[in-house]
Image: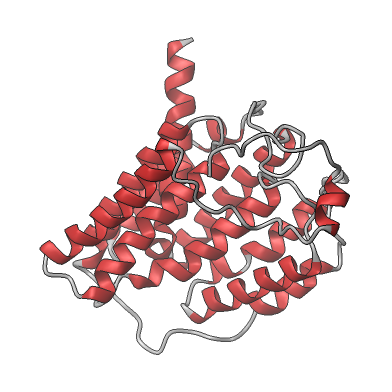
Amino acid sequence: MAPALPTPAVSAQSVSKLGVSALGRPLDLNYPSNRLALYGAGGAILLGLVLKRSWRQALGIGGAAFLGWATARELDPDYPDTAALALGLAGAASVIASFEHTEQAQAVLPGFAALSSVRLLVGTVGPVPTLPDAAALSVQGGLAAFAGTRSAALMPAAALGLSSGQHDVLSPEGSWSLVALAGGLLPWKRAERHRRSIVGDVLSLAALGLGTRLTALETPISDCDQAPRKVAASRLRSGRALSLGALALGVVRGEADSLIPLAAAALGTGLRRFRNERAD
């Protein structure tokens, strides 16, 4: 998830023609931050088991911790420490929420939809999104809808629409947002509704409270993984704004527990920017 090794200078279009997805960022364990993500997620799983959570709950806790880390790498690509904080926040919050729910795997499906949406919008991978990328986002939106988290299910369509509106080299076809919207609007819902815990709301509201700092323009220095360019400041700002919009909708709809990874990543980014402002 850290910047890739130097690659030959090629355009975004030529990378896309080579079949490189705009969504794939495999873990490279040569980077300490990536090893931290793997060990941290494993530790979160073990913690869940020690606390006598079921295997399904424990895997959900570990998944949420990892997704918090991965989403923070998209929202704050210049600062690996933000991802480490998000991993801890998401893992701890998921443990607390697991005492209120019969399972905690519910945050994983919405978490993947949120992660992929932010990743495509920010453009950290590099290539132009393809129709298969849009289809994959549609499937992830549908799975988030199946998990009962409409706020995350709508993120793929919003991400494609906002990306198209950037009118830059990474903008996809505008009609592709409709492909993703089809999945996000599927009338699926969980057969069993769980009690709402307060931890998801607290995490989301704390991130929203730092919203003005989070969305203030910031110029990143990180390179895209598969293209010879920096991550665009306007795209990073849009990705952060999309995250805050999803969190606000999640609080209103009572879905904040399923957005714990996204909330942890947004809160970690906001706290980092607040700390930097105080240091200046």
Q: Nearer the viewer, residue 192 or 177?
A: 177
Q: Position of residue 219 (x, y in %)?
A: 67, 26
Rendered view: 40 above or below 273: below
Q: Position of residue 129 (x, y in %)?
A: 77, 58
Q: Is residue 2 left or right of residue 82?
A: right
Q: Nearer the viewer, residue 181 or 69?
A: 69
Q: Residue furthest bottom?
A: 191
Q: Nearer the viewer, residue 255 or 221?
A: 221
Please report the residue visible at 26 percent of the width from the left and 71 percent of the height from the top. Answer: 57
Please report the residue visible at 72 percent of the width from the left and 32 percent of the height from the top. Answer: 230
Residue 254 in sight from this viewpoint: no
Colour scheme of the picture:
secondary structure
Q: Position of residue 20 (x, y in %)?
A: 74, 57
Q: Quadrant of residue 154?
A: bottom right
Q: Is residue 269 left or right of residue 223?
A: left
Rendered view: 200 above or below 228: below
Rendered view: 203 above or below 190: above
Residue 106 in sight from this viewpoint: yes
Please report the residue visible at 30 percent of the width from the left and 62 percent of the height from the top. Answer: 61
Q: Position of residue 264 (x, y in %)?
A: 40, 47
Q: Nearer the viewer, residue 70 or 36?
A: 36
All told, the count of numbered labels is 0
Please report the residue visible at 44 percent of the width from the left and 45 percent of the height from the top. Answer: 29
